[in-house]
Image (cartoon, helix red, strand yellow):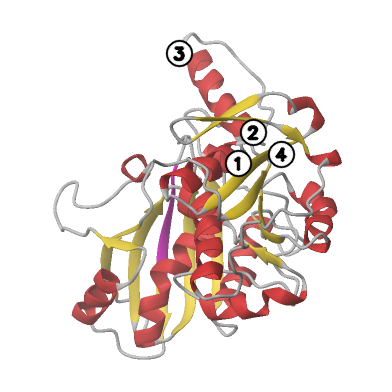
């Protein structure tokens, strides 16, 4: 039964367990029957003592991250915020724990592998130096999963991207703001935005994260540099990242220019056969996947596949995924699974 502890297996800590991604990590570990002998839920001191479910029959009492000793913990899945990971992830790694960090803090450090298991599992071999592995940005993950089989066939040189990112990417507080402001809108009540730069209910906001000197936002910069680190350092990416009034699920519209002529039938076949992708592309009303339909699902869905006649060797597509699952929790758990299946970490022997 999912969530039942075994005598053997790994001791796993989930850091930031009370947040939206942390809860999804616990859920994903249980659903995938990850080999655990113990699971520890960690969060800030103000959340210590609260309870979280694990699987069908376990209740975890949240423990204080600040005082937790990581010695004897085999794997830690981190999603507490970048500043907190900066302090506690190296502490966990120094205690012998393998850290898989969902925050942005370590992603671009050259000796920390940035991993999407369907795309660059070979980079996991470099994890041993720091014992920290970075989980990419949610929108980057789903885009590179869809790009990988196409890049292998035709070699991508440039991608122009527009994202449609749900409020859950801003955490529980972002979801709460959309909910309360939507209710307020129906009764003509005015509420000032707190989590976003403008009103999110009944609106779209072309800003995620802070602005940089060149006019891009940090979220847009992440999609460029992370794609290059994961997939190919020569790919150019121009992104516009937009927050939309959707609770869960990110969508990305991608236009790619390739080095080689694009065969549409070959592209379809490659996407159908690629791990982690579901191609659902019918040229009829409703013949595509939306974020609402991707909620709770593991796959990256690809739709609206078509040639782009405005550039040589151009191809466009639409991809959607659950940002809390494949965009965060699932990818982290898949990294842990890949470490085990490749023998990079071994199951501790029972005492």
State which region is magenta.
249-255
> Of label 3 and label 1, which has the lower sequence position?
1
Residue 310, by quadrant, is: bottom left
Q: Is residue 323 visible?
A: no
Question: Closer to us: mark 1 or mark 4?
Answer: 4
According to the picture, the residue beneath numbered tag 2 turns out to be 18
> Of label 4 and label 3, which has the lower sequence position?
4
Q: Is residue 315 visible?
A: yes
Left/right placement of residue 311 relative to residue 266 reads right
Question: Is there CB contact under 8 Å for labels 2 and 3?
Answer: no
Q: Main secondary structure of the magenta part?
A: strand
Residue 284 is tagged as none
Which residue is located at x 22 percent, y 78 percent?
Answer: 264
Q: Between residues 134 and 162, which one lies in front from this camera angle?
A: 134
The CA distance from mark 4 to mark 2 is 8 Å
Question: Is there CB contact under 8 Å for labels 2 and 1?
Answer: yes
Question: Closer to us: mark 3 or mark 1?
Answer: 1
Question: In the rendered image of this protein, does residue 48 appear above or below residue 332?
Answer: above
The CA distance from mark 4 to mark 3 is 38 Å
Residue 42 is tagged as 4
How many other residues sit within 10 Å of disc 4, few (<14), some (14-19) or many (≥20)?
many
Which residue is located at x 62 percent, y 80 percent?
Answer: 125
Residue 22 is tagged as 1
In percent of width and height, residue 73 lies at 71, 53
According to the picture, the residue beneath numbered tag 3 turns out to be 186
Local SS, label 1 = helix
Question: In the rendered image of this protein, does residue 142 appear above or below residue 316?
Answer: above
> In which quadrant will I find the C terminus?
bottom right
């Amino acid at each position: 039964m999912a969530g039942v502890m075994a005598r053997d297996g790994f001791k796993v800590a989930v850091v930031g367990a009370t947040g939206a991604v942390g809860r999804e990590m616990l859920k994903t570990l249980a659903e995938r029957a990850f080999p655990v002998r113990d699971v520890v839920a960690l969060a800030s001191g103000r959340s210590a003592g609260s309870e979280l479910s694990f699987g069908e029959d376990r209740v975890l009492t949240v423990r204080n991250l600040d005082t937790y000793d990581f010695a004897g913990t085999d794997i830690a899945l981190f999603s507490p915020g970048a500043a907190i990971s900066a302090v506690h992830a190296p502490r966990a790694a120094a205690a012998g724990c393998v850290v898989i960090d969902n925050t942005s803090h370590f992603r671009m450090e050259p000796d920390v592998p940035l991993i999407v298991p369907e795309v660059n599992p070979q980079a996991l071999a470099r994890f041993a130096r720091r014992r920290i592995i970075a989980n990419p940005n949610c929108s980057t993950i789903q885009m590179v999963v869809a790009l990988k089989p196409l890049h292998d066939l035709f070699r991508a040189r440039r991608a122009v991207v527009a994202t449609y990112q749900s409020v859950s990417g801003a955490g529980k507080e972002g979801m709460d703001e959309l909910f309360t402001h939507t209710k307020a809108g129906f009764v003509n009540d005015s509420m000032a935005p707190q989590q976003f730069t403008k009103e999110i209910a009944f609106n779209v906001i072309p800003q995620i994260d802070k602005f940089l000197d060149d006019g891009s936002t940090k979220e847009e910069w992440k999609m460029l540099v992370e794609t290059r680190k994961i997939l190919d350092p020569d790919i150019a990416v121009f992104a516009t990242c937009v927050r939309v009034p959707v609770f869960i699920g990110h969508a990305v519209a991608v236009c790619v220019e390739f080095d080689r002529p694009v065969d549409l039938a070959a592209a379809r076949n490659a996407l159908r056969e690629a791990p982690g992708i579901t191609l659902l592309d019918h040229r009829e009303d409703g013949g595509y996947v939306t974020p609402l339909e991707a909620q709770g699902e593991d796959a990256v869905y690809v739709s609206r596949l078509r040639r782009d006649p405005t550039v040589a060797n151009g191809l466009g597509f639409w991809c959607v995924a659950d940002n809390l699952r494949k965009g965060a929790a699932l990818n982290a758990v898949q990294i842990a699974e890949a470490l085990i299946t490749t023998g990079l970490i071994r199951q501790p022997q029972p005492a």
